[in-house]
Amino acid sequence: SQELEQSPQSLIVQEGKNLTINCTSSKTLYGLYWYKQKYGEGLIFLMMLQKGGEEKSHEKITAKLDEKKQQSSLHITASQPSHAGIYLCGADIWGTYKYIFGTGTRLKVLA
Amino acid sequence: EAGVVQSPRYKIIEKKQPVAFWCNPISGHNTLYWYLQNLGQGPELLIRYENEEAVDDSQLPKDRFSAERLKGVDSTLKIQPAELGDSAVYLCASSNPDSHEQFFGPGTRLTVL
């Protein structure tokens, strides 16, 4: 079973629309990370969340970690074609040295 | 500042052949990771190094996979012999002790025929 569940698996939106991607863990997380990956390339770090209830923004992308530190959401406002790619959440599991990734959400933005 | 460098970018081999991937992390990054990424999946950790010591290799299939980071800088991941199921992207990442942020290389796409 997947320790980090992402939803949806894929998303197609019209340019200008808002969207949300979710990442859920059954275990308490030490840190939650969001990455973006384009086909054939490595992962690009977007942001890290560590405190329960924490929220961070970078340009039009906002991510939040819930109080229990088991779920995070990534929100894109007024999406653009440049936002297209695969969004992956990664996490440190509390009390372990284990670092895991979700299966990713493939985003397509139609111009 | 140069990012994580990986080579080759692409490799096509026949099954049962050996193959090796090379990674040069960002200067000053003590921690180095090798991941395997199958199509449509997130990366899965194969091995993590702290300097030259492999601190987590629990997911490395040791019957055919090996890795080394002799001087605590660049690293090599080897598969011998390769199997059809090894076709995937092999990603290398590095981080420094003060941060959990990992910097990824572009990956090596392996195709085993």
Image (cartoon, coloured by chain):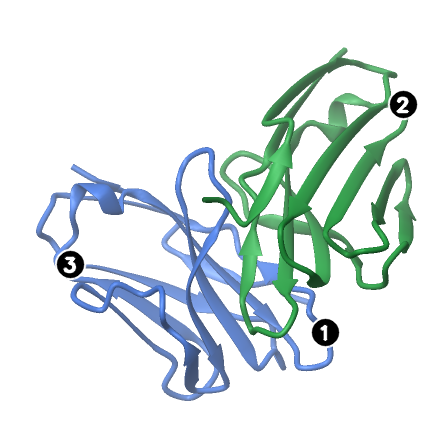
Chain colours: A green, B blue
The residue that appears at 79% across and 29% down in the rendered structure is A20
Q: Which residue is mark 1?
A: B99
Q: Which residue is mark 2?
A: A78
Q: Which residue is mark 3?
A: B18
Left or right of B14, for residue B23: right
Is there one chain holding both mark 1 and mark 3? yes
Q: Nearer the viewer, mark 1 or mark 3?
A: 1
Above or below residue B26? Residue A43 is above
Q: How dense is the environment of label 3, judged by Cα within 10 Å: few (below 14), some, or many (20 and up)?
A: some
Q: Quadrant of the N terminus of chain A?
A: top left
CB contact under 8 Å: marks 2 and 3: no
Which chain contains the residue that carries disc 2?
Answer: A
Q: CA distance from mark 2 to mark 3?
A: 48 Å
Query: Element at badge 3?
Result: loop
Q: CA distance from mark 1 to mark 3?
A: 35 Å
Amino acid beneath label 3: Pro
Amino acid beneath label 2: Ala
Residue B6: image x %, image y %?
Answer: 45, 59
Query: Element at badge 2?
Result: loop
Which chain contains the residue that carries disc 1?
Answer: B
Q: How dense is the environment of label 1, judged by Cα within 10 Å: few (below 14), some, or many (20 and up)?
A: few
Left or right of A44, for residue A72: right
Left or right of B34, for residue A72: right
> Which of the 4 quarters of the picture holds residue B67?
bottom left
